[in-house]
C-alpha cells in the first residue's frame, strides 16, 4: 500500500486482540526499569507467568487499573520517499490495547536515491527521528521499538548497495535513545507487505479482537506487484494452495494460517509493459514502437517505465474492448492462482484499485466506497468504447480497467462480488506500517519470553 503525506491526529481508538499481556510485557518491562515503578513490575510478571509459566511475585490486584501508554516507531523506506509512523497505544491491564493516534511525516526522495552518497542519507533519517523524539515522552524512549522496513525501491538496488544503506541507517538508529534490536532494519518482500496490511485492516475493523469474528481479506495493487491475503476457513483452500501461498502468523497470542501471496510482475505498471509486449528492464529492440489494441487508435506517444522510455501507439482495428480483453487475458493466462473461497470473504482493496475506481467515478475520490467487481468491467467497456471516438483523460484508462477487471476474475472474484475501497478506516491510514509494528512488537515479546 502506498501512503500519502501530512500529519494525522486521529481521535478514535480501537480494541485489539486477545493478548494484552504480551504487549504489556514488551512495552513495560523496559519502562519499569526506566521509571522504577514497582506496580508495573507486577504486570510484567503476570504476563510472563501467562506465557512462560513464571510465578507471580506480586499479586495482580496491585496492578494499576489506569490506562498505560506505549509507543512504536515504524520507518517506511519506499521507492519515492521515507516516511515515519509514530503510533501511540493505550492499554489497561487485562484489556485490549487501543490505538490513540498516529503521527506521520514523509520526506523525499527515497533512500535508494542515496545509493552513491550514503552519508547524505542520514540527514533525512535524523530529521524523522527528531519528529519521534518530539512526539514521544522521553521516559518512554528506551521502551519504544524503532524499526525501518524497506519496500520496492531498495529491493531493486544491487544487493551490496542496499546492504550498505541499511547498515548506515542501523548505525544512526543504534545511536538513538530508542529500543533498537539487531533486526531493526530490513527489506520486506511482497508477502511480508501483504501480511502486514492484512493485520492493519483486521485490527482497524476490530476483527482481531475476537477469535470467532470473521476476518476481512486484503487486495493491493502496486506498480510492480499485486497482493492478496485472507484467512481461509475451508480446508479445500488450504489443500489447494500452491507452495509458498500459505503463511503462519503469530499475532496477539493466536496463530493464523493465512493465504498470502504477492505476484511480482503483475503490478499495474509491470502489467502495462507486458500488455504492450515489452520486456521488464529492456528497451524495445531497435527502439521499435510498441503497438496495442488497449490504447486509443489515434494515440501515439512515449511512456517511461523503470527508467526506460518506450514509444507506444494504438492500433485501429476492430472493437477496442474485445481486442484489449483478449490481449490482457493472454498476459494473465496461467499466472494467477484462483481460490474459490474468496467469494465468501469480505475484501478491502487498496492502491491502484482505489485510484482507478475513483478516476472513473465508481467511488468517491476522497471517501472511497464499495463497488461490484463487475463495475470494473462495465467501466472498461464504456471507457474503451469512448476511446474509439475521442481521446481519454489517460491513454491507459482502457488498458488499466480491462486489466483490473480480468485480474480480479482470474483470482476467483465473481462479477457480483462486493469490494470495499478505502484509504482510511476510522480515520487511520490503512498502510502496512501499523500491522508491521504489531508484528514486530509481537516478535520482541516472543524473544523475551523465550529468554526468560
Ligand atoms: C495465550 O492463550 C493461551 C490459550 O490459548 C492462554 O492459556 C494464555 O494465557 C494466553 N497468554 C497470554 C499472554 O494471553
Ligand atoms: C518473505 O520474507 C519472509 C521473512 O521476512 C520469509 O519468511 C518468506 O519466506 C519470504 N517470502 C518469499 C515469497 O520470499
Image (cartoon, helix red, strand yellow):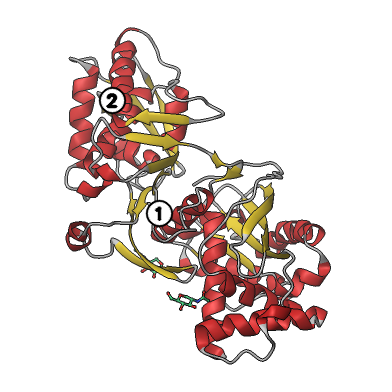
Outermost residue, top direction? 389
Local SS, label 1? loop
Mark 2 highlights which residue? 377
Q: Which comes before the other along the chain, label 2 or label 1?
A: 1
- Residue 372 lies, in percent from the top left, at 33, 29
187 displayed left or right of 268:
right
* Label annotation for residue 213: 1
311 displayed left or right of 252:
left
Local SS, label 2? helix
Q: How many marks?
A: 2
For the residues labelled 2 and 1, the Cα–Cα distance comes to 32 Å
Snapshot quadrant of residue 324? top left
- Ligand 2, by image quadrant, is bottom left
**Nearer to us in this view, 292 or 385:** 385
- Residue 304 lies, in percent from the top left, at 44, 36
Q: Residue at x 72, y 63 (%)?
A: 67
Q: Residue at x 41, y 40 (%)?
A: 349
For label 1, being within 8 Å of ligand 1 is answered no
* Label annotation for residue 298: none
Q: Which quadrant: the C terminus?
A: bottom right
- Residue 416 lies, in percent from the top left, at 26, 30
Which mark lies nearer to you, 2 or 1? 1
**Nearer to us in this view, 290 or 361:** 361
- Above-or-below relation of 356 to 20: above
Outermost residue, front direction? 61
Q: Is residue 375 visible?
A: yes
Amino acid at each position: 500500500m502506498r501512503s500519502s503525506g501530512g500529519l494525522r491526529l486521529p481521535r478514535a481508538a480501537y480494541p485489539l486482540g486477545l493478548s494484552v499481556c504480551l504487549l504489556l510485557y514488551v512495552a513495560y518491562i523496559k519502562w519499569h526499569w526506566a521509571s522504577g515503578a514497582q506496580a508495573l513490575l507486577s504486570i510484567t510478571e503476570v504476563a510472563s507467568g501467562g506465557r512462560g509459566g513464571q510465578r507471580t511475585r506480586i499479586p495482580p490486584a496491585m496492578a494499576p487499573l489506569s490506562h498505560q501508554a506505549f509507543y512504536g516507531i515504524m520507518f517506511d523506506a519506499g521507492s519515492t520517499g521515507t516516511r515515519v509512523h509514530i503510533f501511540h497505544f493505550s492499554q489497561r491491564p487485562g484489556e485490549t490495547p487501543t490505538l490513540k493516534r498516529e503521527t506521520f511525516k514523509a520526506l523525499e526522495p527515497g533512500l535508494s536515491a542515496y545509493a552513491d552518497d550514503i552519508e547524505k542519507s542520514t540527514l533525512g533519517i535524523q530529521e524523522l527521528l527528531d519528529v519521534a523524539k518530539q512526539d514521544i515522552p522521553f521516559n518512554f524512549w528506551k521502551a519504544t521499538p524503532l524499526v525501518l522496513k524497506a519496500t520496492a525501491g531498495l529491493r531493486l538496488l544491487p544487493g551490496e548497495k542496499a546492504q550498505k544503506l541499511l547498515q548506515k541507517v542501523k548505525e544512526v538508529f543504534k545511536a538513538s535513545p530508542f529500543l533498537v534490536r539487531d533486526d531493526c532494519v530490513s527489506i520486506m518482500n511482497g508477502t511480508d507487505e501483504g501480511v502486514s496490511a492484512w493485520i492493519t485492516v483486521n485490527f482497524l475493523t476490530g476483527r482481531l479482537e475476537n477469535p470467532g469474528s470473521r476476518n476481512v481479506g486484503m487486495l493491493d495493487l502496486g506498480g510492480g506487484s499485486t497482493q492478496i491475503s485472507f484467512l481461509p476457513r475451508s480446508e479445500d483452500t488450504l489443500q489447494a494452495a500452491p507452495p509458498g501461498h500459505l503463511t503462519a502468523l503469530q499475532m496477539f497470542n493466536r496463530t493464523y494460517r493465512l493465504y498470502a501471496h504477492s505476484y511480482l510482475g503483475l503490478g499495474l505498471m509491470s502489467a502495462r509493459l507486458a500488455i504492450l509486449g515489452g520486456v521488464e528492464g529492456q528497451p524495445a529492440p531497435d527502439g521499435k514502437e510498441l503497438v496495442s489494441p488497449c490504447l486509443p487508435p489515434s494515440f501515439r506517444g512515449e511512456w517511461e517505465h523503470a527508467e526506460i522510455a518506450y514509444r507506444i501507439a494504438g492500433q485501429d482495428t476492430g472493437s477496442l474492448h474485445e481486442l484489449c480483453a483478449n490481449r490482457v487475458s493472454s498476459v494473465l493466462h496461467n499466472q494467477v492462482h484462483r481460490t474459490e473461497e474468496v467469494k465468501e470473504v469480505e475484501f478491502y482493496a487498496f492502491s491502484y484499485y482505489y485510484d482507478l475506481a475513483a478516476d472513473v467515478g465508481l467511488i468517491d475520490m476522497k471517501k472511497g466506497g464499495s463497488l461490484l467487481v463487475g463495475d470494473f468491467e462495465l467501466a472498461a467497456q464504456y471507457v474503451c468504447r469512448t476511446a474509439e471516438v475521442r481521446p481519454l483523460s489517460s491513454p491507459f484508462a482502457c488498458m488499466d480497467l480491462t486489466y483490473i477487471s480480468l485480474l480480479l476474475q482470474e483470482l476467483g472474484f465473481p462479477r457480483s462480488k462486493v469490494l470495499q475501497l478505502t484509504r482510511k478506516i476510522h480515520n487511520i491510514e490503512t498502510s502496512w506500517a501499523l500491522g508491521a509494528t504489531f508484528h514486530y512488537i509481537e516478535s520482541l515479546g516472543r524473544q523475551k519470553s523465550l529468554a526468560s
